[in-house]
Structure formats: structure tokens, C-alpha cells
Image: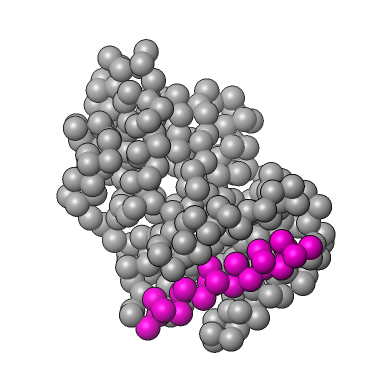
Amino acid sequence: MRIVRTVTELRAALEPHRSGGIGFVPTMGALHEGHLSLLRAAAVENPTVVLSIFVNPTQFGEAADLDAYPRTEEADVELAASAGAHVVFAPSAAEMYPAGFATTISVGGAVTATLEGAVRGRSHFDGVATVVATLLLAVQPDRAYFGAKDAQQVVVVRRMVTDLRIPVAIVTCPTSREADGLARSSRNARLSAEERQLAAIVPRSLRAAQDAFASGIRDAHRLTALVREGLAEAGLDDEYVEIVDADTLDPLTDVTRPALLALAVRVGTVRLIDNVVLDPAVDDRTAVERSGA
């Protein structure tokens, strides 16, 4: 496996492999099983797999959150190799944002105005779109792999790729979960033992709404209220619990088409996000049961 630091090195390393197919997994490092599952999925479909490690400062709204984000490159490289990565692109901030960098990609509409956009501000997704576009243009992969936990990010990236006609297939992989259902995240490592127990309330609250949905309840207010009740019983205050269209992210009052039930909540100082899909045509509970929720 090869580690490269510049776009020039990256393109030179990948040039001999372009005819065979390249899969790309963008990350901010601190790899866990969720990232490794993306790498393994990419390795199945592509002879060459690229992982990027870059803690992008433009998508952090709080300086403290950026400073606290773990940097574990040496361990990440070992894990990436074990999961099938062939090239690790680990650029510096100066490489990604060189002197004079003045371009921002901004995706408009409901896909960036709701959920994370409403809480963290439009600039958060400007940062996401800009860095992902920059990475895609540097790697020029055939396929790029993202986890469903960051569902809004996936929608934003799909919109950007479609609008800018970037020739890459965006592949969404299922949310990777711990045994108790908690969605895997690099931030989970910052939870104390007591907070980690509280965090398990998040997937249980989502499951309660899924059960209600499976029983025939389609009213979005009733479903989100069930989630909020579960969180409140554990003393957790949500930043949002919303049901939106799975493709457009427009808010829904009744779930008559595939929808996303998404939430954000703080457990101690750690901010967690999670979501499940509610589809009138498919009972999604089985997928979550397989993942341990």
C-alpha cells in the first residue's frame, strides 16, 4: 500500500490503474468498523481502492470540535491496508486549500436547509461539498462510497455530482452499528462509560418509531414524538428529530413515500446523529435488526 500527500503524487500513483476501475472512500480518519466496511465494499467492486484521510476544517462549526477530533494516522493506515486499500491520500490543509484558494461549492434548496443545515448553518454543507468535489477531482474514481449514517451528506453529494456532471457513481452503504444498535462514529470514543450507556437510547428510540410505523402509523408528528419521548426519558435533549422525504429532504407531515427519520442529540459534550428509513412499501425493521438495533 502506498501513502501519498499531494495531488500530483496521487494522480501519478493512480494513472496505471484507471482502466481497471477505482473505488474511493473519503474519511477524516480515526477509522472504525464503519469505515472498514466501506473499504471492503469498494474492494469487492474495484481492483484499486483509495482512502483519503483529511480532517476538513471548513465543515466544523465549533473550533473545539475540530480540535478534539482524533488524529490517528498510523493506526488508520494499518487498518486501511487490512481492509483492502491500495492507496492512502493524506494531504495537509495547505495541499487541499493552497494559498489564494477562493472557490466554494454551495448546494441550495431543502437538501442543505433542513436537519444539519438548519442547526449548523449552510456553511457546513458548503464545506462538505467543496472538499468532496476537490477530492473527487483529485482521485477521479469510478465509484465513491459513503455510509448511510450521514444520509444528508449523501443527498448533498449526489445533488452536487449530478448538477456538476462529475463522472462518478455514488454508492451508499448501510449504517454500521455496535451490538446495541449505536451507529458507529469516531466521536463515540469520546463518550464516558456512563454516556455510552445513555447513547444506546438513541437507536432504541428510533426503533420505537419504526415499530409504530410498521403497525400502521403514518403521521410524522406522532412518530417523531415517540422518538423525543424516548430521549427525554433518558434526560437527553434533541437538537432535532425530523421526518423528511428520503430524496429531496422536504419535510413531511405524513409518510406516504420513502422518508428519512433523522435526529441529532448531545450526550455530554458529544454530538451524535442517526437516522432510519421509513418506507411504506418495505418494512425496514429487518435491516436494523440485522445490524443490532
Q: Residue at x 52, y 29 (%)?
A: 169
Q: Main secondary structure of the magenta part?
A: helix
Query: In the picture provided, is 80 more to the left or to the right than 282?
Result: left
Residue interval drawn in magenta: 194-216
Residue 211 or residue 131, whichever sits in front? 211
Looking at the image, residue 267 lies above or below residue 141: below
Closer to the camera in the image, 148 or 69: 148
Residue drawn at point x = 40 percent, y = 62 percent: 178
Location of residue 255 in the rendering, given as x and y in whole percent from the top left corner: 78, 56
* Residue 194: % across, % down: 37, 83
Q: Is residue 133 visible?
A: yes
Left or right of 122 on screen, residue 30 = left
Q: Is-magenta flag for residue 214?
A: yes
Q: Place residue 43 in its image quadrant.
A: top left
Looking at this view, is 226 or 215 the one in front? 215
The verdict on residue 270 being magenta is no
Residue drawn at (64%, 30%) of the image: 163
Quarter of the image for the N terminus: give it.
Answer: top left
- In this rendering, would 282 be left or right of 267? right
Q: Is residue 86 above or below residue 12?
A: below
Q: Position of residue 78 (x, y in %)?
A: 19, 45
The percent position of residue 237, horizontal first and vertical second, equals 58, 80
